[in-house]
Amino acid sequence: MHGRDGERGDAFRCVGCRLDIPVAAPGTAHRNHCPHCLASLHLDARVPGDRAAGCRGRMTPLGLSARPDGEWLIIHRCLSCDGLSANRIAGDDNPLSLIRLATRPLTGTDLPVRTLLGL
Ligand SMILES: [Zn+2]
Ligand SMILES: [Zn+2]
């Protein structure tokens, strides 16, 4: 099984900043976004790690939200298919990037973020 874009089993190349990112991350079983710029690839369909989307579009972080249990999620939007996904933050995500995301208002968008948060 050889992925494109130099993807290996234990690391992936970030679509945003082109750094090689190890898949293993503190606090999550499946790192699916870059800890530096928080960009992601549209790989998973319903379950994180299932790699069933088959889209491979670039996903940019839209905003941050918190679940009732206090877990923080990054809302990603796919630039190719407009798909949305919510991903748990990892223990080594760049705090500055997270804060920048958290303080970005979710205005001027009609995205169903509220619906997404009900998942
Ligand atoms: Zn990156
Ligand atoms: Zn997509």
Image: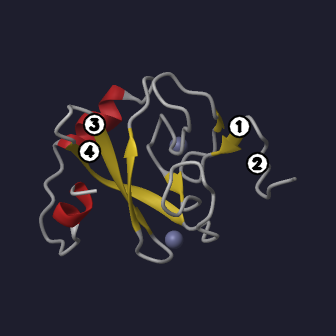
Q: Nearer the viewer, mark 3 or mark 1?
A: 3
| Viewer-proximal residue among 65 and 93 | 65
Lower sequence index among marks 3 and 1? 1
Q: CA distance from mark 4 to mark 1?
A: 24 Å
Lower sequence index among marks 3 and 4? 3
Badge 1: how crowded within 10 Å, few (<14), some, or many (20+)?
Answer: some
Badge 2: how crowded within 10 Å, few (<14), some, or many (20+)?
Answer: some
Horizontal side of 61 relative to 23 (left or right) equals left
Badge 4: how crowded within 10 Å, few (<14), some, or many (20+)?
Answer: some
Q: Find disc 4 in the rendering and name its residue.
A: 101
- Name the residue located 18 percent from the left edge and 50 percent from the top edge: 104
- Residue 65 percent across, percent down from the top left: 22, 45
Q: CA distance from mark 2 to mark 1?
A: 6 Å
Pointer 2 with pointer 1, Cβ within 8 A: yes
Q: Which of the numbered marks, if any, corresponds to residue 11?
A: 1
Q: CA distance from mark 3 to mark 4?
A: 12 Å
Q: Find disc 3 in the rendering and name its residue.
A: 72
- Name the residue located 76 percent from the left edge and 55 percent from the top edge: 5
Q: Nearer the viewer, mark 3 or mark 2?
A: 3
What's the amino acid at mark 1? Answer: Ala
| Ligand 1 under 8 Å from disc 3 Cβ | no
Quadrant (top left, top right, bottom left, bottom right) of the C terminus: bottom left
SS for dot 1: strand
Q: Which of the numbered marks, if any, corresponds to residue 7?
A: 2
Q: CA distance from mark 4 to mark 2?
A: 27 Å
Does 28 appear above or below 33? above
- Residue 54 percent across, percent down from the top left: 64, 70
